[in-house]
Amino acid sequence: MRTVTVGVLGSGTVGQDVLNLIQRRESMFGDMGVRIEIAGVLVRDLGKVRHVPPGTRVTTDPAFLQECGMVIEVMGGVDRPLEMLLPYLRSGRPVITANKALLAERWDVLRDYALAGSLYYEASVMAGTPVIGPMSTVLRASTFTRLQAVLNGTCLYILGQMERGKDYADALAGAQALGYAETPPTLDVGGFDTAHKLAVLARFCADGNFPYSAVTVQGIEHITPQDIQAARAAGECIRLVAELERQEGGWRATVAPQRLPDSHPLCTAGAGRNALVYEGEECGTLVFAGGGAGGMITASAMVGDLLDWVLGFPGHVPLH
């Protein structure tokens, strides 16, 4: 039995569910001849109540990272996790992350590690609904032409509530009360979370160096009930759409509200869920839809990445 020592950075909802799912899959790892040992979980507040497996070492001291063969990052943010992960990556050890902001905004630093297969990040876009895996493997045989996607559950919830008659302010307040939107909610409703995810996706199908700064972003703050009603009267729905398509001389990447026919996959397959429509010359049109957020949904993708690493599969490699 081989022991694999894992460190976890962060222990919010996703981090706790990652730890519990690793314990739940103990027999699966055992069948592979592996025992997962959690070296430590880095947190900011030791006094906070956490639902983690008994005996889990929770600490504010990151020294345990030195003894880890793999690190799982679920702390969020950009500069702080990068500062902690870079020495680890430089030592040749792999990282699993769901941090789309880090991947989008610090790609110039991280790309070489991704090319080396040291970064695993299926959960960074659409959480447990697998889109990065297919785009980084089998879909590369097809000539990519376009994608459209709904990638932010908070905006989807707000627009859905407005379709039910609420104005924007009340719908946003409801999303914040349920914990869907943070305070301030700009990252979600301003379209920046979606733009982070679009930049990550673009590196698998358009350009391995695709910069986050190339994404044009417009949020949903200006949408009114009158806009919603006009769309519905025309048999359409309004969604915050991430779109990537070829244009003369390169690629056009946008995030903006769009009116789509009610029959569009982003309005049907994506009803209440994240959804992505991928178009390629050889593969045709493919639709991915499912949960795009949530603790255990995200944890399922991250533990799946851990299983891949244990089996010897590389991380998610962008276009060369």
Image (cartoon, rainbow, N blue to C red):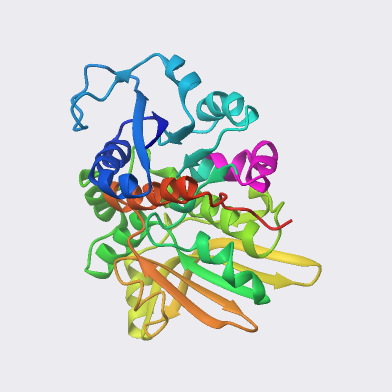
Where the C terminus falls, by quadrant?
Answer: bottom right
Q: Which residue lies most toward the front here?
A: 1
Percent coordinates x, y for residue 31 in the rendering: 32, 49
| Span shown in magenta | 102-117
Q: Is residue 215 above or below residue 289?
A: above
Query: Which picture quadrant has residue 46?
Result: top left
Percent coordinates x, y for residue 178 in the rendering: 21, 47
The residue closer to the viewer here, 143 or 217, is: 143
Tally of numbered tags:
0
Residue at x 43%, y 36% (from the top left corner): 72
The residue closer to the viewer here, 150 or 218, is: 150
Q: Is residue 43 above or below residue 25?
A: above
Residue at x 22%, y 69% (from the top left corner): 164
Q: Residue 175 in magenta?
A: no
Magenta residues: mostly which secondary structure? Answer: helix
Residue at x 43%, y 45% (from the top left corner): 306
The residue closer to the viewer here, 156 or 313, is: 313
Q: Residue 111 in magenta?
A: yes
Percent coordinates x, y for residue 297 in the rendering: 31, 53
Q: Is residue 308 above or below residue 143?
A: above
The residue closer to the viewer here, 98 or 184, is: 98
Percent coordinates x, y for residue 100 in the rendering: 50, 46
Residue at x 18%, y 25% (from the top left corner): 49
Q: Which residue lies most toward the right here?
A: 249
Where the N terminus falls, by quadrant?
Answer: top left
Q: Is residue 87 above or below residue 105?
A: above
